[in-house]
Image (cartoon, helix red, strand yellow):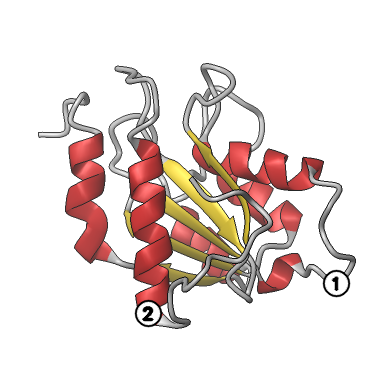
Amino acid sequence: MTTPGSPIPDGPPPGPDGDRYWLARAVELGRRCPPSTTAFSVGAMIVAADGTLLAEGYSRAQEPHDHAEEVALRRLAARTDLAAGTDPAAATVYSSLEPCSARASRPRTCTELILAAGIGRVVFAWREPSLFVDCDGAERLAAAGVEVVEIPALAVDVRAVNSHLPLG
């Protein structure tokens, strides 16, 4: 694992190849989730525009109802070593699953938390299936001015991480 706050040596190139690199890392992070029959296993990373990893998280990392984006955003907010010029609007959240827009376990959704943090870009692999809730996080983020990129080529890997669920 890379230490947050460090640029990745010989890291990914900017653009689509960099997006695939970081998203694949988020998918792998999702494998750390304790399996649950009532929740998806998701990984998330927050990366600055210069390729610096700012924070990461995965579902149920600290508490049973934690979502990956929520953990990463909480860790980002707790960092005291960030440069004063670190602009959340220039950062990207990479999440293996579309950020939730409805949630039964907590009052704020991941979509709301991303918007409140001022993150300017979200990249994800798999749209959230309506197994637990109906989700339109991508549409809500885009409507609020966040750049949203879906890379469905990695969705098969996210489905594999979530093979503990009855996805059909």
Q: Position of residue 56 (x, y in %)?
A: 56, 45
The quadrant holding residue 32 is top left
Identify the residue at horizontal 35%, vertical 77% (top origin): 17
Residue type, label 1 = Gly
Q: Secondary structure at mark 2?
A: helix
Q: Position of residue 73 (x, y in %)?
A: 67, 45
The quadrant holding residue 150 is bottom left
Query: Is 19 left or right of 143, judged from the image as shown?
Result: left
- Could you give the CA–CA distance between mark 1 and mark 2, rounded to whole angstroms? 25 Å
In this view, the residue in front, 84 or 5, is: 5
Is residue 115 placed above or below 59 in the rendered structure?
Answer: below
**Residue bearing the label numbered 1:** 85
Q: Position of residue 128 (x, y in %)?
A: 34, 46
Which residue is situated farthest in the left direction here?
A: 168
Is residue 33 placed above or below 91 in the rendered structure?
Answer: above
Tell me which numbered mark, 1 or 2, is placed earlier along the sequence: 2
Mark 1 crowd level (few <14, some 14–19, many ≥20, 10 Å Cα): few
